Image (spheres, grey):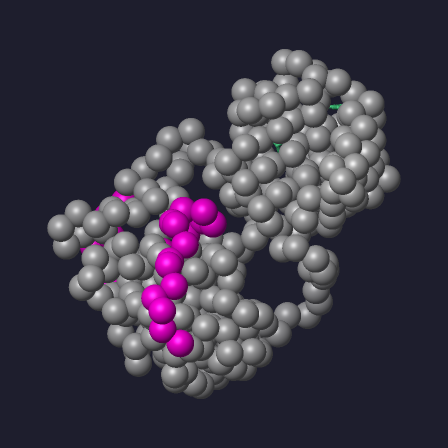
Amino acid sequence: MILVVQWNGKGLNQGTVELIGGARQLAGGGDEVAVLVTGPGAREAAAAAGEYGARAYAVEADLDGYAGEAYVATLAAACERIRPRIVLMPSDARGREIGPRLAARLGGAAVTDVVEARRDGDRVIWSRPVFGGKAIADVVLKKEPQVATVRPGSFAAAEKAGAGPAEVEVLPAAGTDRPLRRAEVLAEAEGGVRLEEARVVVSGGRGLGGPEAFKDLEELAGLLGGAVGASLAAVDEGWAPPERQVGQTGKIIAPDLYIAIGISGASQHLAGIAGAKTVVAINKDPEAPIFEVARLGVAMDYRKVLPALIEEVRKLKAG
Ligand SMILES: Cc1cc2nc3c(=O)[nH]c(=O)nc-3n(C[C@H](O)[C@H](O)[C@H](O)COP(=O)(O)OP(=O)(O)OC[C@H]3O[C@@H](n4cnc5c(N)ncnc54)[C@H](O)[C@@H]3O)c2cc1C
């Protein structure tokens, strides 16, 4: 059995459909694939996994109010029941926290930040970036279950299997005797398109010079049906909330189009967009490293470019 985990019950995520695709690839027809969704709405979201031919499990309790311990305890109990050989989960902040702890709890092994995986006989070879994305390490885990956190865009999405919704087995949330509770949420996720799932991301850096320009970025992202991202420098300045940060210590994303405005392209920032299909950069310094990864670049003050770009996109949409 290969188990795919999704953290929220707001429908079946695109990321989960990719992980189901990855699970199928690793199963090679041998293993069954199952999806476990946690959180309110989990049952409906899990049922949709049936359309991709996967079995479905749900934990409907809201585990978010607690520290990671509740997730670890609940997933460990679920894995005792489901007995997966491999567990795949997103490589977001929660996955990177929970994955290794779950593996340790189950006596298995973990690998984080996977960007590719393939079968080699009975083994799975997991590939993950190291040294800030400058090299790729191939990893073989010697214990099971193998728990892997996977970056978005690493696997092709699963095809629908022509089946209807799955019958969902509802599993209980496991209690925890460690009374850790989240005391305060410092930044609330905003509405709109989720950064991790957006096909278009318009990102701003220190070069924007202040918070006002982020409103223009919001406008452009809105017109393109995308989300706004930011560099660490812009977050540190307080111009964008921390959940918008893209990069090694922020979100790892793989949009079709990444527009970097006033971002120099430090390796730690680029580590977050290695999976982006097309990078467009606006930066007044023609020597900025962002141009090395950009397919299209404008070496100009963004103040001259951005209003015209917004205007042009608006016209295209209207016409
Ligand atoms: C351990 C570690 C982890 C890190 N993790 C991250 C991370 O996750 N994400 C991240 O982003 N960074 C991260 N960093 C920080 C990273 O090294 C850079 O400092 C940061 O990315 C710089 O942000 P920036 O490009 O916005 O700012 P700068 O490097 O200051 O670049 C600003 C750019 O804007 C351009 N510019 C200025 N004015 C204009 C204008 N009017 N029009 C057009 N262009 C203009 C400049 O030419 C310059 O290239 C990390 C660093 C460390 C040490």
Q: Is residue 188 visible?
A: yes
Q: Is 221 placed left or right of 42 in the picture?
A: right
Quarter-of-image position of residue 103: bottom left
- Name the residue rendered at 51%, 43% in the picture: 254
Quarter-of-image position of residue 168: bottom left
* Residue 273 position within the rendered picture, expressed as x and y whole percent measured from the top left: 53, 37
Q: Is residue 271 visible?
A: no
- Name the residue rendered at 30%, 47% in the picture: 117
Q: Nearer the viewer, residue 133 or 286?
A: 286
- Span shown in magenta: 139-164
Q: Is 95 placed left or right of 212 in the picture?
A: left
Q: How many marks?
A: 0
Residue 147, magenta (yes or no): yes
* Residue 13 position within the rendered picture, expressed as x and y whole percent measured from the top left: 51, 62
Q: Nearer the viewer, residue 106 or 221?
A: 221
- Name the residue rendered at 40%, 70% in the picture: 51
Q: Residue furthest left?
A: 121
Residue 24, magenta (yes or no): no
Does residue 209 sit above or below 57 in this rendering? above
User: Where ligand 1 lies, by image quadrant?
Assistant: top right
Quarter-of-image position of residue 280: top right
